Image (cartoon, rainbow, N blue to C red):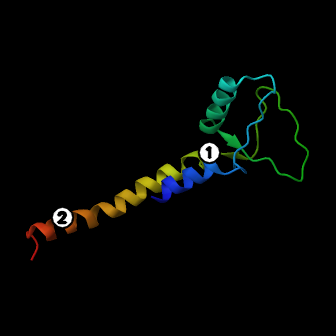
Amino acid sequence: MIRYLNSAHAIVDTDFPMQCWIPQEFTRSWEEYAENYCWIETTYFSPLDKQLHISTPGESRTHIVRYYQWATIVLGIQAAAFYFPCFIWRLFQDSGLLT
């Protein structure tokens, strides 16, 4: 449940936590493609107090963030893994196998 609320907040929120810089000449379909690509590719942290420079191909970014996109999925799997034993216990208890 929390996974879906967290994902919904990221999609609906006007201050979307991930911003991709997209050229203005992109059409709506290209913009959607670029946003999806940006969401699943490796992101990197850019401090707000420092000026951003354009990197050249092969230049490494020092603050790569690899966990951000998958955090809600991992939390959802963990929630299901922790709820599963409770579900099984209640199933056996309601069927009368555990007395």
Q: Which residue is mark 2?
A: 91
Where residue 35 appears, as percent x and y from the top left, is: 66, 34
Give the alpha-carbon distance from disc 2 to disc 1, as whole Å: 38 Å
Left or right of 37? Residue 46 is right
Count of numbered circles in the view: 2
State the quadrant of the N terminus: bottom left
- Dividing the picture into quadrants, the one containing residue 81 is bottom left
Is residue 75 positioned above or below 97 on the image? Answer: above
Residue labelled with disc 1: 66
The picture quadrant where one finds residue 20 is top right
68 to the left or right of 61: left
Q: Which sits in the foreground, 61 or 73?
A: 73
Q: Are marks 2 and 1 in contact (CB under 8 Å)?
A: no
**Residue flagged by tag 1: what amino acid is it?**
Arg
Foreground residue among 69 and 29 = 29
* Element type at mark 2: helix
